[in-house]
Structures are given as C-alpha cells and as structure tokens.
Image (cartoon, grey):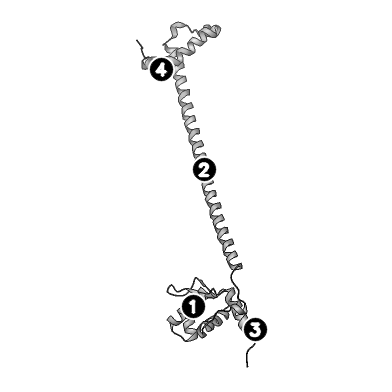
Amino acid sequence: MLVLPSLEEWFFLPGDWIVYLLASRVPAAAEWLGLSAGDYGGTTAGFLAWICWIVLALAAIAATSALRRFDRALTGRIIDAALELRRRLRMAIVIAKYRRNLRAQRTEPSFEVGEEPGLSRDELRVLELHAKLSPGFALSTSDVAHELGARGYEIRSALERLQKLKLLQATVGGLDGETAYTLSAAGRTLLQIRHARPRVA
C-alpha cells in the first residue's frame, strides 16, 4: 500500500537529506557539527529545511520575475516588429500608388492635329479659362459659370465632357462639395495645337 508523506515530513525532507548527505559523504563534518541519524526530523534538520524552503521560495520569485521580464521583452519586440512591418507595407503601398500615378501622367494622351476632338464653343472657352490659371489653382463649376456668365448646368456638362476626354482633370476644391478642375497635359497640348494652327483669312 502506497503511503504518502505528511506535511510535516515534507517540511523536514530537505533538512533530513542534508543531514544524510553530511553523515554519509562527509562524516568528519557531520561529527564536527554533531550530526547523526538521530537528528532526522529534529531541530537541526528543521532549521536546515527552513533555510532550504526560503531559498527555494526566493529562487521561484526570481525565476518568475525573470520570466515576466522575458515575456515583456519578447512581446515588445513582436509588437515593434509588427508595427515596423505595417509601416513598411504602408510605405510600399504609397510608393506603388505614386509610381502608378507617375506612369499615368507620363502616358497621358496628347493630340495630333488630325486627332483633335470636336469641341463646342463653351468647351473651348472653359479650356481657355483653365489655361490662364496659375500653377496650384483650380476652378469649380460655379467659378467657371461665374467667369463665363453661363448657367451652371451648361458648364457642368461641358466640364464633365472635357474630363471624359482627359482635357481636364478633377481635383479637390470648390465650395459645398463641388469638384474643382485643372487643365491636363493633353488639354494644354490641344490648346497649343489650336493656337499654332494658321488662321484662314
């Protein structure tokens, strides 16, 4: 039948082991200290066991603290690595968008004389008005209508067609959520072609 040690026996166990080791392995030290088999479970064994349990508790506290520090350091490095990865991914996306927009600008269509689209008088006036803008400025639908003295729906239709032809490009601006427009490279090329064309007398 298996008999488990009592709590008292568990407490004295480290001290009893020390007494046993000294008596069996270092008998001279045991004799000098006055230790023998009769000290098992006694005051000396209890004192030695008490010291062992305190040392064990301190070692457990130190190990737990070290484990927590390691866990915090490891978690911090994982978080930093994730943030750095997200930052690099965001930078890659921004750079990819920038390069795509740059390629789109480089491949924006230009017009030869024979390819010139047919434009109405209002559409030509809108293009001429945008050509006079300083760099960095844009005109909204209401701005164009005011400058040309035309109705808003007429100007809106002209702006949308010019944008569809890629002669104007939409940008952020305007009041009350209106879209603002600037002259594109294709639109500027078209105006240069028209101005360079010899006028018929």
Q: Real-space Cα distance between discs 1 and 2?
A: 52 Å
- Of marks 2 and 4, the one in the foreground: 2
Q: Real-space Cα distance between discs 4 and 1?
A: 92 Å
Q: Position of residue 92 (x, y in %)?
A: 56, 55
CB-based contact (under 8 Å), mark 4 and mark 3: no
Mark seen at residue 196? 3
Q: Quadrant of residue 53?
A: top left
Earlier residue among tags 1 and 2: 2
Q: Which residue is mark 1?
A: 159
Which structural element holds mark 3?
A: helix
| Nearer-the-camera pick, 20 or 155 | 155
Earlier residue among tags 2 and 3: 2
| Nearer-the-camera pick, 191 or 67 | 191
- Residue drawn at x 49%, y 39% is 72
Q: Is residue 139 visible?
A: no
**Badge 2 amino acid:** Ile
- Of marks 3 and 1, the one in the foreground: 3
